Image (cartoon, rainbow, N blue to C red):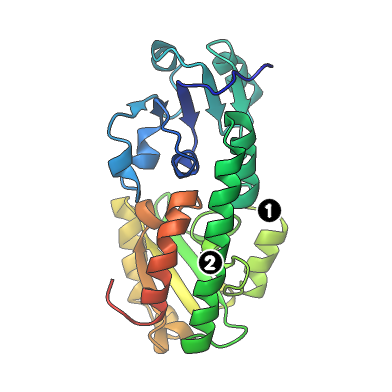
Amino acid sequence: MEIPERPRRIVYHGETLGDLLALGVKPVGGDEAFARNSVYKHRLKKLANVGFPLDPQLTASLNPDLIIFANADERAYRIVSSIAPALTFDSFAPLEQRMRILGSWLGKQREAEAWLASFYAKNAAMWQRLYEETLQPGETASALIYDHGSHLFAMGRTGLSSALYAPGGLQPPEVIRGILDQELGFAEVDPAQLHTYAGDRIFMLIPERKDSREAMEQLMRSPLWNSLPAVRKGQVYLLENAKWNSADALTREKLLNLLPKLLGGQPV
């Protein structure tokens, strides 16, 4: 498939819309659900919602010259590639890999390298400062969320944990390291085994679903929860899932300011 040179009307269907925005590219269409409560929602006011799953008719109505599709389903790919040139994209891939792939596709290689160099310098400086002032070497962290009702998950390869376990950052507990080694985005947690998933610091992501939020609140009232060392030490941080549980470039950038405040006990 031939990629159009410097495409102008891009439909991006995936959860890392912030990657494109970091490269100075505004898609004409995408899944509005991923942008609705994000840190970059103000930059996507004119984004046409193509739905989830992607609606072929809505997508075709935008006259795209390129579709970037974060889905490995071959049948779905055949449908979208009949509308316009289409590329599949691994939105769970590491940030550096994603930015360089997008840069090569969109003629933004220089922008991608410049953004990555700036980001990694700031990321290294942030963690160095935190370990000098706040953290102890070898500290572990967990990012947990209730979803699909009362199902508890630990984040692995994607979402907030990609920032927590970045180079120079916090360490995953051994059981979560296994999730990362399997290259899983997340894994379900048996609440009875929560102590093996809980790090020295716990980031609890507040779900949008009412039943999942109630399940989270019930857990946080339980003796099991209150027995965890992170809870007893006051090292639990509550964050909105829709806003912060993303691995995209712009969210990662915003977390460079948020994490020092959270870990340092400052109001946010």
Quarter of the picture containing the N terminus is top right
Which is more toward the observer, 239 or 186? 239
Crowding at mark 1 (Cα within 10 Å: few <14, some 14-19, many 20+): some
**Which residue is at 57% across, 53% downward?**
116
Quarter of the picture containing the C terminus is bottom left
Q: Is residue 204 above or below residue 87?
A: below
| Mark 2, residue position | 123
Q: Is residue 6 above or below residue 157?
A: above
Decide if residue 43 is on the left or right side of residue 115.
Answer: left
**Which residue is at 64% across, 53% downward?**
184
Task: Identify residue type, mark 2.
Answer: Asn
Which is more toward the observer, 124 or 221? 124
State which quadrant residue 267 falls in: bottom left
Task: Identify residue type, mark 1.
Answer: Glu
State which quadrant residue 60 falls in: top left
Q: Is residue 187 visible?
A: no
Q: Position of residue 177 (x, y in %)?
A: 67, 67
| Mark 1, residue position | 183
**Which residue is at 44% across, 86% downward?**
227
Q: Nearer the viewer, mark 1 or mark 2?
A: 2
